[in-house]
Image (cartoon, rainbow, N blue to C red):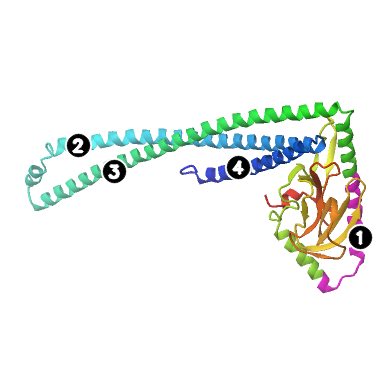
Amino acid sequence: MFAGHPMWGQTIDELQKEIQEAENAIKRSNELLEENKSQQKSGLAQLSLVKSNIENRKTIISNLDKQIKITQNGISSNNTEISSLNKDLKRMKEEYAKVLISSYKEYKLNNYFLFLFASKDFHDFFMRMYYLKKHTALRERKAKEIANTTSQIKTETESLQKKQTELAGMVKEKNNEITKLNQEEKSYENTISKLKKEEGKLFSDIEKSRNTITQLQKRIQEIIEEEAERMKKEKLSQEEEALLKRLSGDFEDNKGKLPAPVKNGVIVEKFGVHAHPVQTGLKIDNKGINITASNGSSVHAIYKGEVSKIFFFQGLNNSIMIRHGNYITVYSNLSEVNVTVGQQIATNQVIGKIEASDGSNGMLHFEIWKETTPQNPESWLAK
């Protein structure tokens, strides 16, 4: 994007791509919020979507800040380059002036013929001719240097003006995003206030949901540890070990390229330790991610493998575990299951559906494990 500085263009492109991804997520969140409104549903799902919008909006603002800094660095670099070129241009003009003065003095008002015919002999004539050629070449070279430098200054000036226009656009865009962020934060606070009035329904819903997911995660971890222990004791044939290794390698080769388990879903809770959505100072540890999608959305296997377990957990419906070599993917809160234990699954195959009991948006709890170590699903899924 910036002339002479491809690394800036690449960085700006990457930041703009992240902004576009965040904007797409915000758009999808707003669509799901509208679905809730049409069903006159207001609760934890709505709160999570507004919170997701706030986080995505902050990502956009952060990336715009980075773009502004990169652009300001580019402007500074352009100004330095223009200043340096102007100094060079001044020096070249001074040198060129000296050449012209010398030409005026030595060649008697450029009367080269008089200068040549004043030669004492042929050798002197040849030397004077050589001197004139050298002098003319020097003058032409100086003139060319001045022209090239003038052209460089024009190019750098145009680039500077372009960057300044881009900067003004970014600053305006950032201010617009800050206004939208303030509106969404106000909406989040209003939603909390509204739900607080409903006899603590918000807090009881959040606590119930969080406790249920925490208990489910413990159960998933227990099952995975039992599975790992079983596989250690089980003697596999060389062929089975080779297959296991190949499946693991295939899964790893697709890191960052795997399809989403729910199409057009929005991640409303990320992986890892982070602040409780309501209770200040309280941390929660999510072993996977929570994805909100339209009620009744299909759930897809993110990669080929074998269904190793299906189990029911009170409060989060059915869970399906699919083994991909040493990796396991877990899909929880399925109201409908379309597969059986031992079944071979293809990438993107529909394995069930998510559905909310109250008719609002559905929510999928999704985890990826490498043996007994939880992975951040966002690192594995394609953007």
Residue 182 percent location from the top left of the image: 68, 27
Q: Is residue 200 visible?
A: yes
- Residue bearing mark 1: 229
Name the residue: 84% across, 65% down: 343
Query: Of circles 4 and 3, which is in front?
Result: 4
Q: Quadrant of residue 61?
A: top right
Q: Quadrant of residue 330?
A: bottom right
Residue 266 percent location from the top left of the image: 73, 44
Name the residue: 11% across, 49% down: 124
| Residue stretch rendered in magenta on the structure | 214-240
User: In the image shown, does 49 or 88 lie closer to the viewer?
Assistant: 49
User: Residue 102 shows which numbered tag?
Assistant: 2
Q: Label 3 near label 4: C-beta < 8 Å?
A: no
- Amino acid type at circle 2 is Ser
Q: Is residue 213 magenta?
A: no
Give the distance between the C-alpha atoms of the residues marked 4 and 2, in whole angstroms.
Answer: 57 Å
